[in-house]
Image (cartoon, rainbow, N blue to C red):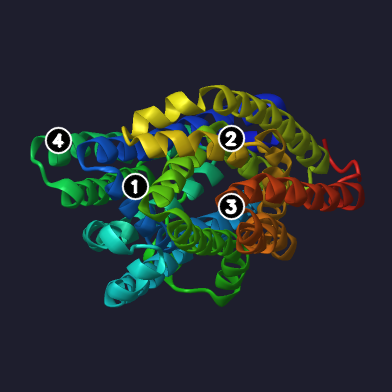
């Protein structure tokens, strides 16, 4: 059954296939986003708005280490998808074994370093004043669970590369539901505060990993690796690293962005401004779930068909993914524009934050209808194994455009300069990505090789 499902990536109609791949991915991302969203609501209402800011300070560090797992997962999954498309199962197995070994080695090293420099990292990421103490509590506990999360994120991308999006969806739902239940028990019922919030998150990572381990040991996975596959293969590691570096670089830039944003906003408006950004950041994770789901669903389809040299299907998958994502992005845009005040009131009762967040949120989401092109374009190059353009296009928005904007515009426009940087970066990076994607389609995907 597993073999048939993987081969279906090259047979079924692209529109139907994209829906089948994207819907479970979207549901999984939705549940994970709801987890982050509701977790923030719980923390804001049961602990306070300073606790929201504290979690926002910790996220870049823990997310960067966890992103190692996702980077290794996506880099290796690109190889696995193309290997399955080319009917080279042994290469797929060796790649999966190398992914596990590499994830374990790197995340354990980084957790040790992260705990060693805790008193430097938290203030550097904006954990100053009243934010420092709760941030340190949350950071210490959550970091212990990051290797579990990294392995789970890596495994989830491999599940999708096998053409099993429903199991990938379940893997994302389990920790989300578990975290919310444990939040209620640890924070509301047991009164453990930030300590309880941190342990709820860490335990949820372990639940996710347990399910993924079960999947790969079960009959549903065709990737049955042996001990010999765990031995590091330089050729495979090089390709995993080059493709995974795209994802890791993106998360590194996200972490740098959090660092800069937290510090810039703290200097402009104190703890309340950091809390405003924390709420907007949660909405960015939550509201864009359907667009991100389409992007996740698109990756294995493009990779498999590119490996099978079915270039017409690759073109079809690009066009269909962009169309679906643009429609969904437009709906997200409309929801934010009309309901931003109601959204903010769910997170906090602080009147200043309720007043300041809605206009900032509208600026941040202003270019949402067009970002699909940027996301799908960068994802295409990663899916087909073209690391350099994937890296440059992935970094174009936040690295090359957004960071310079938030360093310059606030000098002239204050806090509003921070918020208008978002749509400007979205528009400019979309134009750049559109140009290179169109060029790639004309030069590489036009030959009618295999239907």
Q: Residue furthest left?
A: 190
Q: Earlier in the sequence, mark 2 or mark 3?
A: 2
Bin the neighbour count of mark 4 within 10 Å (Cα to Cα): few under 14, some 14-19, many 20 and up: some
Can I make out residue 3 in this image? no
Nearest to the observer: residue 180 or residue 424: 424
Left or right side of 180 for 355:
right
Q: Which of label 1 and label 2 is nearer to you? A: 2
Q: Earlier in the sequence, mark 4 or mark 2?
A: 4
Q: Which of label 4 and label 3 is nearer to you? A: 3
Which disc is residue 188 wearing?
Answer: 4
Whether pointer 1 and pointer 3 mark residues with C-beta atoms closer than 8 Å, the reply is no
Which disc is residue 138 wearing?
Answer: none
| SS for dot 4 | helix
| SS for dot 1 | helix
Residue under circle 3?
418
Image coordinates for residue 373, horizontal then vertical, percent: 73, 41
Q: Earlier in the sequence, mark 1 or mark 4?
A: 4
Whole-angstrom CA distance, mark 2 to mark 3, is 13 Å
Residue under circle 1?
217
Whole-angstrom CA distance, mark 1 to mark 4, is 37 Å
| SS for dot 2 | helix
Residue under circle 2?
362
């Amino acid at each position: 059954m597993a073999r048939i499902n993987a081969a279906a990536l090259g047979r079924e109609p692209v529109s139907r296939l994209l829906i089948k791949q994207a819907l479970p991915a979207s549901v999984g991302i939705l549940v994970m986003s709801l987890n982050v969203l509701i977790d923030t609501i719980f923390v804001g209402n049961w602990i306070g708005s300073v606790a929201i800011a504290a979690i926002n300070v910790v996220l870049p560090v823990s997310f960067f280490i966890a992103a190692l797992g996702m980077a290794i997962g996506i880099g290796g999954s690109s190889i696995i998808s193309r290997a399955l498309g080319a009917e080279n199962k042994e290469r797929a197995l060796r790649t999966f074994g190398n992914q596990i070994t590499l994830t374990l080695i790197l995340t354990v090293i980084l957790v040790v370093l992260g705990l060693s420099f805790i008193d430097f990292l938290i203030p550097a990421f904006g954990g100053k004043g009243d934010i420092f103490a709760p941030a340190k509590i949350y950071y210490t506990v959550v970091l212990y669970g990051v290797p579990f999360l990294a392995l789970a994120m890596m495994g989830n991308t491999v599940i999708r590369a096998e053409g099993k999006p429903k199991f990938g969806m379940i893997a994302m739902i389990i920790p989300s539901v578990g975290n919310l239940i444990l939040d209620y028990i640890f924070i509301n019922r047991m009164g453990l505060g930030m300590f309880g919030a941190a342990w709820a998150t860490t335990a949820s990572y372990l639940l996710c990993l347990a399910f993924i381990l079960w999947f790969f040991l079960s009959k549903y996975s065709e990737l049955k690796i042996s001990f010999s596959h765990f031995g590091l293969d330089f050729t495979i590691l090089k390709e995993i690293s080059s493709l995974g570096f795209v994802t890791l670089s993106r998360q590194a830039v996200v972490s740098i962005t959090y660092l800069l944003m937290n510090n810039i906003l703290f200097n402009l408006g104190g703890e309340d401004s950091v809390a405003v950004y924390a709420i907007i950041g949660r909405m960015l994770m939550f509201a864009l779930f359907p667009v991100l789901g389409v992007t996740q669903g698109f990756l294995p389809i493009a990779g498999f068909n590119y490996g099978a040299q079915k270039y017409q299907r690759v073109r079809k998958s690009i066009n269909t993914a962009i169309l679906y994502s643009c429609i969904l992005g437009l709906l997200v845009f409309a929801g934010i524009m009309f309901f931003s005040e109601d959204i903010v009131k769910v997170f906090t009762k602080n009147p200043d934050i309720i007043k300041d967040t809605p206009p900032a949120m509208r600026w941040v989401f202003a270019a949402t209808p067009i970002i699909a092109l940027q996301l799908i374009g960068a994802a295409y190059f990663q899916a087909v194994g073209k690391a350099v353009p994937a890296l440059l296009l992935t970094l174009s928005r936040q690295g090359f455009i957004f960071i310079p904007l938030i360093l310059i515009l606030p000098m002239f426009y204050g806090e509003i300069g921070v918020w208008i940087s978002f749509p400007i970066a979205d528009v400019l990076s979309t134009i750049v990505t559109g140009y290179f994607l169109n060029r790639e389609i004309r030069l590489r995907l036009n030959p009618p090789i295999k239907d």
